[in-house]
Image (cartoon, rainbow, N blue to C red):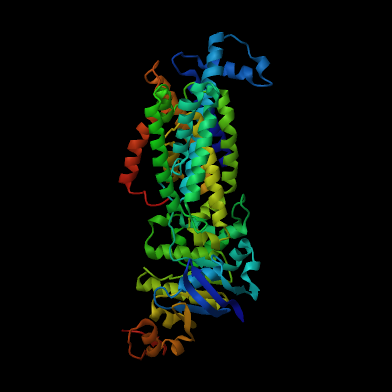
Amino acid sequence: MDKMRLENVYFAYGEEPVLQGLSLSLQEGRFSGIVGPNGAGKSTVLKLLDGYIKPQQGAVYLNGENLRTYSLAQLAQEIALIPQTSYYIPFTVQEMVLLGRTPFYSRLGAPSEQDRQIAQESMEITGVAHLAHRLVSDLSGGERQRVTIARAFAQQTKVLLLDEPTTHLDLEHQVNTCRLLKEKSREGVTVLAVLHDLNLAAAFCDYVFVLNGGVLMEEGSPGEVLTPELIAQVFRVSVPSLQHPLTGRPIIVP
Amino acid sequence: MTRSLCRFSGLLLLLCAAVLAATALGSVRIPLGDVLGIIASQLPGVGGLVEKDWSLAHEVIVLKVRLPRVLLALVVGGGLSVAGVLFQGSLRNPLADPYIIGVSSGASLGAAVGLLLVIPTGLVGHGFLPLFAFAGALVATWVVSRLGQRRGRLEPTSLLLAGVAVGAFLTAVVSLLMVLRIENLQEVYLWLMGSLSGRTWNHLTMSAPYVLGGLLVALWLAKDLNVYLLGEEAAHSLGIDVQRVQRLVLMIGSLMAAACVSVSGVIGFVGLMVPHALRLVFGAEHRRLMFHSLWGGAVFLLTADTLARTLFSPIELPVGIITAFVGGPFFIYLLKRGSAGHG
């Protein structure tokens, strides 16, 4: 079933059109990736899905309903977004992760015992529970990224959007992040991540969207989509046709 | 819960002790017992029970001179500090202070216009000076917040730049006025340095409602400000109406700062330093930070003002000199500490 859908979406920043009639749908419980060269409109797609920006034409749907019919508070309980840049303020890890529970308690209230429990579980899943009382600003890049993911997990939404969650991470943390996202999708969460690393997309995503110049070039399983022909066309780099000896998934090496 | 109640009453006691001590100190020393008696005699209920064995002169000094000034120091110190928290939070910049988007330069121009052009004509009395400053501050803030928008959205960077530009322009106008009209120059100059000297209960009633009202709204928005620190997109995704919160916060921050500046002149560094220092101690969570900044700023300015009027008594220093004297080195310390990167 379609969890979310973009239908004929047109979006421009000022005069400069970024998306011109883009349609795509996210299937429930799938780990999808968006790949494409810089300026393809990948981040714009995430912001539209999160309702941070609104399409100038066309519409975004969540559970079959136009996104405009949801209030901000309702959206916060349905969709979590991890943007490209996060600010790391002197919050402790625990405080930071608890911020993921803000849509669930009143403005003058405090997080409940259950909220704390959920935050604790998210920290354990992402492996940052032992850092609970450290300041986020004192952590390494990989640890920060895991805290940010823990915050999004604590929001317990059915949709998870991530803008380049693996950039600036070393190989181990890249792989761990992707594994976490994959596990989340197996629990029924619809995950969509913008990924710059084609090999990570090939190895972990169930489904890949290839975006170029605001147009959806191709979509499908990594094996179907990430062919040398398409990569030559979209990224202007010629690559040999290689496959992982164990998984059979494509490997992209220039 | 009981622990925070204990801490709260402890702070309240500290505050009362500071008020009593500051009221007793000065060019005329008044015994603490007398200060306590004079204040108690004014309280409804217990007033009649106090035996009046102090001189009338002391009573006048306490009630007409020192107490309003002491309380005003608390209001202005607390108000500027909480406004500082609001500006640092909503601009996500640890170097922001309550004056950064034009409050002080606008208030200065308003005060200069009042002191140099209007009050000398006898049209209105000296008591209207805070109103001139208040109006100037609000107009300047309004202009800056109009200039700080791009595509209908407030942007921290544009706001900061607009604030600097408008501030420089208004300061130039003030200087020009001062060159052209030199009769009341000293008064303008003293105002610009910031002082609580000679302030009355009127000044208190003019500023305290804004500070208290602003504080309530600020506490109401504390949760949103916490989330806002994560960045606009992340805050939006957590259900915060980013633009609305930002506008509201800047509005009440400016109102609080304008109310303080209009009664005290430009007292620097309080709104920058107090929130910054307390954030290092108590963390960035806004409700906690606002609470601590409120009493921390209040006690800090009260101490500074008491020093200002006792250090070289009977000569009185503008309190702005003391706060800048402490603030300058503190700022250098923060820079050397290398922690200026995050709000």
Give the residue drawn at x 63%, y 14%.
Answer: B50
Question: Where is residue B28 shown, x and y percent of the image?
Answer: 46, 13
Residue B47 position (above or below residue B278)? above
Q: Nearer the viewer, residue B16 or A240?
A: A240
Dividing the picture into quarters, in which one does residue A103 lie?
bottom right
Quadrant where the N terminus of chain B lies?
A: top right
Question: Where is residue B7 shown, x and y percent of the image?
Answer: 54, 37
Residue B5 visible? The answer is yes
Question: Where is residue B90 shown, x and y percent of the image?
Answer: 49, 50
- Counting the numbered discs, the total is 0
Q: Nearer the viewer, residue B274 or B172?
A: B172
Taking A122 as reference, is B327 left or right? Answer: left
Give the residue drawn at x 62%, y 70%.
Answer: A67
Residue A79 position (above or below residue B44)? below
Residue B257 visible? The answer is no
Question: Where is residue B131 shown, x and y percent of the image?
Answer: 55, 31
Give the residue drawn at x 47%, y 46%.
Answer: B144
Dividing the picture into quarters, in which one does residue B56 lie?
top right
Residue B127 position (above or below residue A251)? above
Q: Nearer the viewer, residue B342 or A247?
A: B342
Dividing the picture into quarters, in which one does residue A63 lie?
bottom right
Give the residue drawn at x 56%, y 64%.
Answer: A155
Taking A238 as reference, is A91 left or right? Answer: right
Residue A205 position (above or below residue B75)? below
